[in-house]
Image: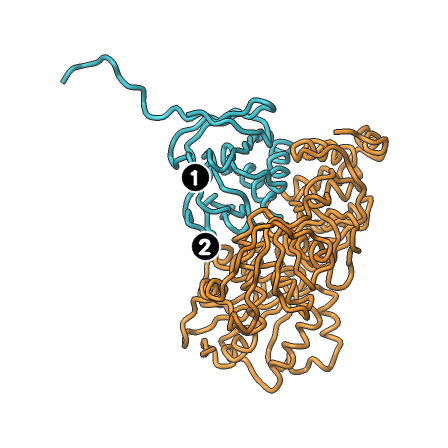
Amino acid sequence: MKLEPIDRALLAGEHGAAAGRAMALLVRYGEACGAERFIPIESAHIDGCLYHGPSSIDFVERFVDLGGKVRVPTTLNVAAVDVTHPGWHCGPPDIIAQQKELTRLHELLGCLPTLTCAPYQRMARPRRGEHVAWAESNAIVFINSVLGARTDRYGDFTDLCAALTGRVPLAGLHRDEARRPAVVFELPSIDAARLPRDLYFAAIGYVVGRRAPGIIPYLRGLPPDANEDELKALGATGASSGALALFHAEGVTPEAADMPTVGLPVETVSPAEVAGAIASLCRAVEGEAVAAVCLGTPHYSMHEFDLLNKAVDGRRRAAATEVYVSTSREIAAGIADDDAFGPLRAFGVNIVVDTCTYLAPVVRETSGLILTTSGKYAHYGPGNLGRRVALMTLERCIRSAETGRVVAP
Amino acid sequence: MMIRGNALIEGMASGALLKLTDPLSLWGGVDLQTGRIVDASHPQRGAILADRLLAMPGSRGSSSSSSALVELARTKRAPAGVITTRADPILTIGALVADDLYGVAIPILIISEDDFARLSCGATGHLWCETGRSVLTIPGREPVRFSGPTV
């Protein structure tokens, strides 16, 4: 790779031994990616703060020991446990201390302990065209597609090395050429798909993720009034079923109008395929007992809390069915301070912060069915938690929570 | 059989091929305590990655897959090497860090989709990944015996 003076200085340890070590790793990474040079970044979002085992600590501790500090504003993704509600934690007890240590080490490096998978909702919104180094698959696809910022599909470790140096190899989705679509999908409208609106976006994401492995799709036919929560659901589900890191949606996303589509293969997504995706993620049987409803994957927005608050107004959940919503501490504090969310509290909603309920086991009943509105949760939940998960509309989740059993659609 | 490809990560490895028919997310798709595939939607659910040459048609999913690979390397449950059809930045950094932290080399070879189709599960393969000359060799069945006890 061709190194600029700043790259050589970083590599030589002139900006500290930690940055030197991070740069050495980035050079090897950049060479493997076939990059020719480095570019500066404006921010980073770190996924490596989620505890997976001792290797999580081993990696970050070396940089702390070398006195490392991040060189760009850096936020932290979710953790493995909600340390503010230790009583809810049903997993191995050691993980609370291990996660606290991992978060502390990242804070020593200067990362902001935002502990959210959706910092783009409020606190960190990269601008169009800005180069950043973000990890967390749902955040990558959201800021690339919906905000028009530029991040490659970064994994753990690359994110922290980028933050400690302020540099990334010019590769992947940082490059104009790599952001161009390779296929056009003609989507069925919500009406043609005969799906409720709040299942439609997850279903489209699931299908597109599967059918566009490693390529950029151009979506034609998405409702022009699709809001950020809906695009968040589409992206998160596509990044789970496939490797969706950027999509363009005609009339919806900022870069779509500039993208050449002439001559691209055009593929049709049929209503049956979309319905099939939903069916594969919802194998619940009517009348089946419901252990819990888990929402907020990715983290719930203020707008989603408003919708939930209206949906549960005047209702009470069944005693045996727990309801959990995952979000950031910042949004949770806003809900806690607002009297308008009385219906939410009356219904018996537990708000989990810092993590996600498919990572951190909190549901007390350990084997029964979990309902969710999230395609990402429905995809990962069964493997992570070893239990059944069913995707359905918010309205059906709430009615089922009320009766304690899966109700008819 | 010999298949030429490009080294994403250099190194050598031998092992039985575990050929996946769908992409896999190492995080969320593999139980880190056992190294077993747990993705409910994956056709090879239940298979164990340790010491195998993992042949997969691309990756999917989570940014945490690099951490998952490193944690598997730390506990000696990582695949011996990876053969895939598309360069994947998340696997790349996972393999680099497995080497950096624990000295565990996980070579990654990129081959064409046509060559990928020729691979069969269970065959023993030898992976030699070096810039400019990377190959996967599969010796095939036991050598034909030309002499020996007559029946």
Q: Is residue A100 above or below residue B125?
A: below
* Residue at the (49%, 77%) spot, across then down: A400
Tell me which amino acid carries mark 1: Lys
Circle 2 Cα neighbour tier, 10 Å, few/some/many (<14 / 14–19 / ≥20): some
Q: Position of residue A54 (x, y in %)?
A: 61, 43
- Residue B7: give x, y in percent of width and height: 58, 29
- Residue B41 circle label: 2
Q: Are marks 2 and 1 on the same chain?
A: yes
Mark found first going from the N terminus, 2 or 1: 1
Question: Chain B rendered in what hue?
Answer: cyan
Callout 2 secondary element: loop
Residue toward you, A243 or A106: A243
As displayed, is residue A176 above or below residue A85?
above
Three-letter residue code for mark 2: Ser
Q: Secondary structure at mark 1?
A: strand
Chain identity for the colour orange used in the image: A
Label 1 belongs to which residue? B19
Judge from the rendering whether residue A261 lies leftward or rightward of residue B109; answer left or right: right
Q: Find residue B88 and report its horizontal and vertical position in percent.
A: 60, 40
